[in-house]
Image: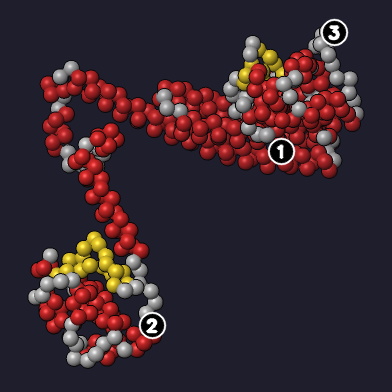
Amino acid sequence: MIWLAREFGSIFPTLCFCGDRMPKYDKIEDLLSELYQNRKLFSSLFERRMAEVAEEAVLELIDASSEKLERLAGYGLLVRTPGHVKLSDQLEDFFSEYMEVDETVHVLYIQENLSEIRKLKDYWLKDRQERYLLKIRKHLRGIIRITALNVKTLRNNMEETYTTEGNFEVKRQKLEDVRTQRDALEGVIRALERMLEDDIFFRSASDEEMLQIVHLLKIMLHESRHNLLEIQHKVISYLNHIEQRAAVVDKVLRLKMLKDRHYLQQQSNFRDLAVECEDLPLAGNDPLRSRLSLPDMREEEAMQELVLKVRIRLKHRALLARNVAGEMPDSALAAAESIESSINLFALKNIFLKRNGDLFSFVMEHDFEEPLTEDARAGIFCQLASRFSAELDFRDETKEVGELEVAVVYGKRNA
């Protein structure tokens, strides 16, 4: 709570001395208590600071109390316009700066702090009182915070402008503004570096705290110079890219104008160049996207028959997908070599293709030289179906044989 009291020192005089009729806070604790009790209201208004907030929506956050809303506006914490409510400028600026979401580059703040430091240095050199050094330290810490925040804001504004702004002219103008702000910020940083070169003052007024603040300030200024240099290179690159894009767009618009007026072939060699150029990308064929009419599907018999056929086919596919074989018993694995060695699958396949009927029935009814169990015959069916699938016709249907559900397979000759 101490930092809040310190930061609101600039707000407190405004609230207390804006007129005889305006209510005021006699103590800073009263202001802090007011902010805490209505924290949901202030948080909501800050999140929606870029839009107009209706007064009805604000009343929902303070138990529909019009008296409380009027009181907060009277103290200068809120601003009421016809039908809308917003945060006061002091609160919004404080929240934006502390949360580091401010979208404005405040070069003037740094210049004001720098001017104050210069005056305080002169005061201290003439009358060496500690209170001047306290204020100098405060302004130096403020410069460190504001300068680092300005560099971050400048970078964010540059990236957001280039990636989100759709109008070429507005994008170019905003990037030019970013470059102007960058140059101004660089000038202030140079002035700060020249101030730190004043060895007379800092050698005379140096203590542990002052030395630490100056050291942090030098590090921050060094990093800021590098960041500003990178921002300058990016802005130049972005502006060059925009100019190239704008030139291409101008040429395309010029060609479109000639085409619309049927001057393209007479006033340009576009067709000749297009024929000679082999590097133009070819657009792929767009898939056919047709939307069926639901009333027609309900009323026309032909459409209903097609829907039923599709439904039956999808049902058969679902059955085949669920028809997963279980684990093979150890006995089947142990007898695999003897079955394969005694049965010629190629000869068995040739016999099946000369007959009618499905493959599973053929395997179950075939007279083998050695008696085979149903599990062994099922294994032979699986081997034939997988090894000679190219010569077989797999139907979109299944049949149940005992506890088994098997696919219906015919030879292509018998299909």
Are the two marked residues, 3 and 1, in contact with CB atoms closer than 8 angstroms? no
Residue nearest the viewer, comparing 48 with 399: 399
Q: Which residue is mark 3?
A: 20
On screen, residue 320 versus residue 90, left or right, reads: left
Task: Please tell me whether residue 150 is drawn above or below residue 354 in the rendered image.
Answer: above
Examine the rendering and report whether any part of residue 230 can be seen: yes
- Determine the secondary structure under disc 3: loop
The answer to whether residue 383 is above or below residue 295 is below
Relative placement, left or right, of 343 versus 57 is: left
In the figure, residue 71 lies in which quadrant? top right
Marks 3 and 2 sit apart, C-alpha to C-alpha, by 98 Å
Q: Quadrant of the N terminus?
A: top right
Q: Which residue is mark 1?
A: 217
Image marks 2 and 1: residues in contact by CB distance under 8 Å: no
Give the mark, 3 or 1, whose residue is nearer the N terminus: 3
Q: Identify the residue under disc 2.
A: 329
Q: Position of residue 69 (x, y in %)?
A: 74, 18
Q: Residues within 10 Å of mark 3 (few under 14, many from 20)?
A: few
Which part of the image, by quadrant, shows the C terminus?
bottom left
Q: Nearer the viewer, residue 387 or 245?
A: 387
Q: Quadrant of residue 43?
A: top right
Q: Residue at x 19, y 87 (%)?
A: 368
Give the amino acid at mark 2.
Pro
